[in-house]
Image (cartoon, rainbow, N blue to C red):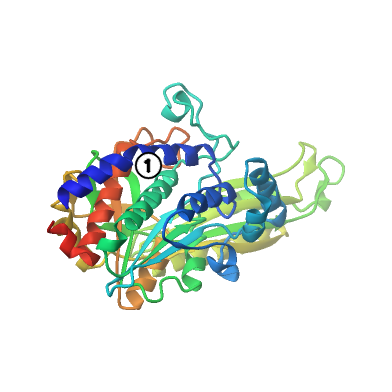
């Protein structure tokens, strides 16, 4: 099997690279991944999977931070212009993006669920000649949207695993569910897939991430630790406009209220029992220098080492927001537009991953753990698996990084795609195809 998987990985590597580059050019933000959803569906349609889209994929009410209907319609119009058939688009409108693919071998074995996130970020991609996507002609075509976190690579990895399962289904046992998840950024999409029941009988769950820290090609991290709980908040501040010269006393300054909120939020005392974070990432207010601003918006996030620490930050943030609003005589509406919990890789996988991957000629090194110090809504899926008695893991696929995640110059080494697919294939075989490994 070592020779078979090594040869197979080499054969699929050009397709992984091509898929990633196609996806990179059509970067789409969360719940607006219409072109991406159609691309994934097309690639899976010829394989031995049952495919699910639209409201079969997501529980509508369990989504966080769905864009406004106006924004969704703008992206739907773009999707039509970029070649998504209207009949297909009609099935996934209003932010019901993503694909679930299921395969049953008909033989007794584990139900293995794998998750691959598909969304991009609201970032304008760099156009410098030193930036490989720009230099080699696969920079994002969509203004203000960029795959700056590697999810284009994750989607390509998922398509690679789908191809592996399709081609080796007669040598494998059990069932497989592939989750191509929308809206990971902002911790918005995973909960809606869990609520739809896709994890309810999973024995084993696998997911992972490219990069996080610069690591050599061929490196796999068996356990990601330090996944922080998080809350994403939007604040709408409503005051009263007025002439800044003739009647400033009649105004209620939303900009000053928002500014006071931002300063107060960043002075919240850290929790004594675990790491905490807070960041106001956006403040928008005002229309002119001679107008007392009547409206403002804030976008912020809190994080904590556990749900307890994050809840403390969230509650304190809301208290300070309301306090500043009262001080300036404005109204402040706080909306929770994303949530993430904490989770850890099961010890079963921490032991099994190094053991299974020792046979791989593509994986060169397996590190025991890496601390994320960030948030990932995959934790909803990990917890759902664990609460049902299954075992969950979140891996890291090593790659050198040209810039940090969420940076306009972000990129990764495409050789990491084949390593990730090879590693996941070995893990699948170790669980549901042990006999193959002895060939």
State which quadrant residue 326 falls in. Answer: bottom right
Residue that carries the numbered disc 1 in the rendered image:
16
- Say whether residue 269 is visible: no
Closer to the camera, 82 or 119? 82
Q: Residue at x 50, y 31 (%)?
A: 139
Q: Residue at x 55, y 50 (%)?
A: 38
Indicate the position of residue 230 as horizontal and vertical percent values: 45, 61
Q: Residue at x 42, y 36 (%)?
A: 410
Number of numbered discs overlaid on the protein picture:
1
Indicate the position of residue 384 as horizontal and vertical percent values: 39, 73
- In the picture shown, does residue 129 fall above or below 189? above
State which quadrant residue 55 falls in. Answer: bottom right
- In the picture shown, does residue 220 fall above or below 355? above
- Say whether residue 104 is visible: yes
Residue 298 in the figure: left or right of residue 241: left
Residue 430 in the figure: left or right of residue 60: left
Indicate the position of residue 65 as horizontal and vertical percent values: 59, 59
- In the picture shown, does residue 185 fall above or below 111? above
- In the picture shown, does residue 25 fall above or below 328? above
Indicate the position of residue 378 as horizontal and vertical percent values: 40, 61
Q: Residue at x 38, y 55 (%)?
A: 162
Q: Count neighbours of disc 1 (C-alpha within 10 A) and say few if under 14, some if 14 to 19, many if 20 or more.
A: many
- Secondary structure state at the residue bearing disc 1: helix
Task: Identify the residue at the far top of this view.
Answer: 129
Task: Identify the residue at the far bottom of this view.
Answer: 388
Closer to the camera, 289 or 204? 204
Task: Identify the residue at the far front of this view.
Answer: 170
Residue 233 in the figure: left or right of residue 72: left
Q: Dividing the image into 4 quarters, which one contains the C terminus?
A: bottom left
Closer to the camera, 337 or 426? 426
């Amino acid at each position: 099997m070592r020779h078979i998987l090594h040869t197979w990985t080499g054969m699929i590597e050009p397709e992984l690279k091509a898929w990633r580059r196609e996806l990179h050019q059509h970067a789409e933000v969360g719940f607006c991944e219409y072109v991406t959803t159609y691309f994934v569906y097309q690639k899976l349609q010829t394989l031995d999977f049952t495919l699910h889209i639209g409201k079969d994929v997501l529980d509508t009410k369990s989504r966080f931070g769905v864009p406004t209907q106006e924004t969704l319609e703008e992206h739907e119009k773009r999707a039509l212009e970029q070649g998504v058939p209207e009949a297909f688009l009609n099935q996934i409108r209003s932010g019901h993006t993503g694909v679930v693919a299921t395969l049953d071998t008909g033989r007794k074995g584990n139900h293995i669920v794998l998750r691959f996130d598909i969304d991009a970020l609201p970032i304008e991609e760099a156009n410098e000649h030193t930036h490989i996507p720009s230099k080699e002609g696969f920079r994002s075509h969509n203004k203000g949207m960029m795959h700056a976190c590697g999810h284009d690579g994750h989607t390509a990895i998922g398509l690679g695993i789908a191809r592996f399962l399709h081609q080796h289904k007669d040598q494998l046992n059990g069932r497989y569910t592939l989750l191509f998840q929308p809206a990971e950024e902002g911790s918005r999409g995973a909960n809606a897939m869990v609520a739809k029941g896709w994890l309810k009988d999973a024995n084993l769950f696998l997911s992972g991430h490219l990069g996080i820290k610069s690591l050599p090609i061929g490196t796999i991290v068996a356990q990601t630790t330090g996944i922080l709980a998080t809350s994403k908040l939007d604040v709408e501040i409503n005051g009263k406009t007025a002439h800044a010269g003739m009647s400033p006393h009649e105004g209620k300054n939303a900009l000053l209220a928002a500014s006071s909120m931002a300063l107060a939020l960043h002075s919240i005392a850290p929790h004594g029992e675990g790491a905490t974070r807070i960041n106001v990432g956006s403040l928008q207010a005002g229309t002119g220098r001679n107008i007392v601003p009547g409206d403002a918006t804030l976008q912020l996030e809190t994080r904590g080492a556990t749900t307890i620490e994050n809840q403390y930050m969230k509650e304190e943030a809301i208290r300070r927001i309301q306090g500043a609003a009262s001080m300036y005589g404005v109204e402040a509406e706080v909306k929770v537009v994303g949530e993430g919990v904490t989770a850890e890789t099961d010890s079963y996988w921490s032991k099994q991953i190094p053991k299974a991957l020792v046979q791989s000629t593509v994986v060169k090194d397996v590190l025991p753990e890496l601390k994320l110090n960030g948030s990932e809504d995959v934790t909803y899926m990990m917890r759902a698996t664990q609460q049902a008695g299954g075992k969950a893991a979140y891996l890291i696929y090593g790659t050198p990084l040209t810039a940090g995640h969420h940076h306009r110059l972000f990129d990764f080494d495409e050789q990491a795609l084949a390593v990730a697919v090879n590693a996941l294939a070995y893990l699948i075989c170790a669980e549901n195809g042990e006999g193959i490994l002895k060939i």
